[in-house]
Image (spheres, helix red, strand yellow):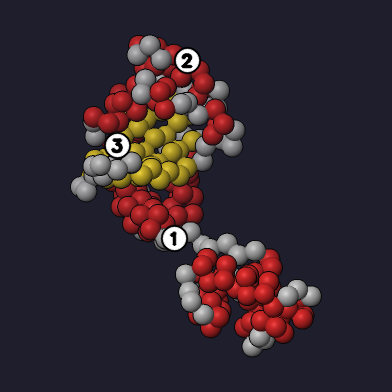
């Protein structure tokens, strides 16, 4: 495995590129499905879970419940070890959770490899590769696969911590209605509330009502600030 592939993964410039490189890398290793997640588990607060990968579109509708996830032997093992491991149907049958394997197997999650890296500041990075086919039986090939997975996870977690935490820190973009944007556009042209009302066939009072809503959504206190804020956010 070329070292450049690992390096490119760690140096991904945005989440979309990171996800695309993860999928491409997984395919090169012989796996059609890949899932990665960064978990931030601060004491006294709910865990923050940020995931990416290429699950089938229908898979999210069949996800197991929280109660079932507590029975999942793969998830349980990821919580207590940092060593890559293999899982398949026997893993679930032995744990009395064959029904969970059957649900996931229908979407291609039949056998795979996974690893969890437990990082400082209550952060955990999880990486899993799945496919329909059985894994190689050769000890040498399996050992190489585990080594590749470990190295892949080390490089991927660097990008995940950098990119996913940045994405989570960004506040959601304010949503303005079509009418609010229309009024703000005329306001940007220097029109008064009365003039905007005449143009839109609504009252001056209604225009000011919409402007107050815009101020609240954009966290500003004047028409000038609202226009500048909307422009900065790409809303105008």
Residue at x 59% of width, y 37% of height: 57
Are there few (<14), some (14-19), or many (20+) residues within 10 Å of tag 1?
few
**Residue that carries the numbered disc 3 in the rendered image:** 116
Image quarter hosting the C terminus: bottom right
> Alpha-carbon distance for marks 3 and 1?
28 Å
Q: Where 182 falls versus 171 (above or below)?
A: below
Hey, which quadrant is residue 80 in on the image? top left
Neighbor class of circle 2 (other Cα within 10 Å; few <14, some 14-19, many 20+) is: few
Residue drawn at 57 percent across, 31 percent down: 61
Question: Upstream in the sequence, badge 2 or badge 1?
Answer: 2
Relative to 19, say whether 131 is above or below. above
Element type where label 1 sits in the image: loop
Q: Residue 25: x, y in percent?
A: 43, 44
Mark yes or no: residue 25 visible. no
Tally of numbered discs: 3
Residue 99 is tagged as 2
Is residue 16 rendered to the left or right of residue 97? right
Q: Where's residue 140, x and y in %?
A: 30, 27
Dot 3 alpha-carbon crowd within 10 angstroms: few under 14, some 14 to 19, many 20 or more: many
Secondary element at image label 2: helix
Earlier residue among tags 3 and 2:
2
The residue tagged 1 is 171
């Amino acid at each position: 495995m070329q070292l450049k592939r690992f390096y490119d993964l760690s140096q991904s410039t945005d989440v979309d590129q990171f996800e695309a490189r993860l999928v491409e890398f997984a395919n090169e290793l012989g796996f059609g499905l890949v899932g990665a997640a960064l978990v931030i588990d601060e004491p006294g607060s709910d865990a923050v879970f940020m995931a990416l990968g290429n699950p089938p579109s229908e898979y999210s509708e069949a996800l197991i419940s929280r109660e079932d996830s507590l029975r999942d032997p793969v998830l349980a093992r990821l919580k207590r070890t940092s060593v890559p491991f293999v899982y398949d149907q026997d893993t679930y049958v032995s744990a009395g959770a064959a029904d969970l394997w059957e649900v996931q197997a229908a979407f291609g999650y039949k056998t795979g490899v996974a690893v969890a890296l437990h990082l400082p500041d209550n952060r955990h990075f999880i990486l899993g590769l799945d496919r329909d086919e059985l894994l190689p039986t050769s000890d040498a090939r399996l050992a190489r696969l585990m080594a590749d997975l470990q190295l892949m996870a080390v490089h991927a977690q660097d990008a995940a911590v950098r990119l996913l935490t940045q994405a989570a820190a960004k506040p959601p973009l304010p949503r303005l209605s079509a009418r609010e944007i229309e009024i703000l556009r005329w306001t940007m042209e220097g029109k008064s509330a009365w003039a905007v009302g005449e143009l839109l066939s609504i009252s001056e009072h209604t225009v000011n009502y919409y402007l107050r809503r815009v101020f609240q959504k954009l966290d500003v206190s004047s028409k000038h600030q609202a226009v500048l804020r909307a422009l900065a956010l790409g809303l105008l």
